[in-house]
Amino acid sequence: LTVSSKHPKLFRALLQMERTASCGGLAGRIGRSRRLASMMPRTASLGVRLRSMWFGLATCAAALTFTSAASSKGHDYGAVFSKERDVGIKFADLPGFTRSVVERDHALITPESRVWSGTPGWQKTSTAHLITPSFPMGAELTMYLADMATGGVFKSDEKEQMHLERFVFVVEGSVSINCADGPLTLKDDDFAFFPPGYKHEIINLDEAKLVVYERQHFYSTETVPAFHSGSTSDKPILPVPGEIFKLRKCLPEQEEYDFNIHVMDFEPGEFLNIKEVHYNQHGLLLLEGQGIYRLGERWYSVQAGDAIWMAPFVPQWFGALGKKRSRYILYKDTYRHPGSYEPLKLA
């Protein structure tokens, strides 16, 4: 139906080919005529070839249709907040079931386990915390989702949280930012970094849905990082020796920035070459696609909307599966001495 409606000429051509291909079966049924019998192997062979061509062209047409429908922006993050995210698993018929797992050195938090509530500073906004410093995680970062309703506003509190830094990534909709470097508008796939002590206000414009990273800034130098904003699509793809995935970094690689946010793309079948073990912590949200994530000695099936916390030195690996690109956004702490997390006290 998709091929016939969006590619009518191709559909008519394929239909004619199918009718031609069916001659092989007709010749087999007639069979009495020597002439037809002698033609039958060639006709049947032609039918097989034409049927193969039919399926090949139909597959190409379907792929073209899928690509044009899903990728006018170059990304599709609709599954992250979608209420249809759990299609295929009817949780109402599986009491007590969840894919979420919390271990000593990692956690997988899946959409059916999210608990939405309010958070100070966020007006007319529901938030779902996925990673926090609270026991048993003890993470050095906080990562949460924010679903802003009409009239939704966030106002920073520099007096109570003078060392807090914040990174906001727009998954859906759009927001307006009021700050010393603004005002500016962020739409889906855009982001902004707010350094410690930086006053700012986030205003919902169009059903904004955000992922937010926060942490207490680690002062490795006396230089305070600067406000930064941009869009994933504007960031260059960086070389990663030995790897084939595409890597973009949202923040400058400078010593005053104590973390960075990576956006990583994997085509189906691509995977991490290095089985990583390192002291850096991670907070990950799968924005698109699906795959397998190894964490410690466990292997998890993951898909868009899943969040992962990775503690220092947990073995980790990812392989992308499915029929479309997989993309995730990833927090990684940087420019600090391993095991030394006490911030520099500034006068």
Image (spheres, rainbow, N blue to C red):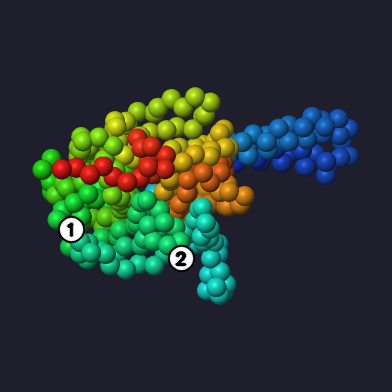
Residue sitting nearer the eye, 199 or 192: 199
Count up the numbered dots.
2
Quickly name the residue at label 2: 113
- Who's the residue at 71% across and 41% down the image? 22
Amino acid type shown at disc 2: Ser
Q: Is residue 103 above or below residue 76?
A: below
| Helix, strand or loop at mark 2 | helix
Please state which of residues 28 and 11 is positioned toward the viewer in this rendering.
11
Under circle 1, the secondary element is loop
Q: Position of residue 194 (x, y in %)?
A: 22, 45
Tell me, yes or no, if residue 222 can be seen here.
yes
**What's the distance in space between the residues labelled 2 and 1, CA to CA?**
30 Å
Given residues 171 and 253, the one toward you in this image is 253
Residue 242 as seen in the image, left or right of residue 329: right
Q: At 80% across and 39% down in the image, what residue appears? A: 27
**Along the polypeptide, which appears first: circle 2 or circle 1?**
2
Q: Residues within 10 Å of mark 1 (few under 14, many from 20)?
A: few
Q: Are marks 2 and 1 in contact (CB under 8 Å)?
A: no
Where residue 160 is drawn, which disc sits there?
Answer: 1
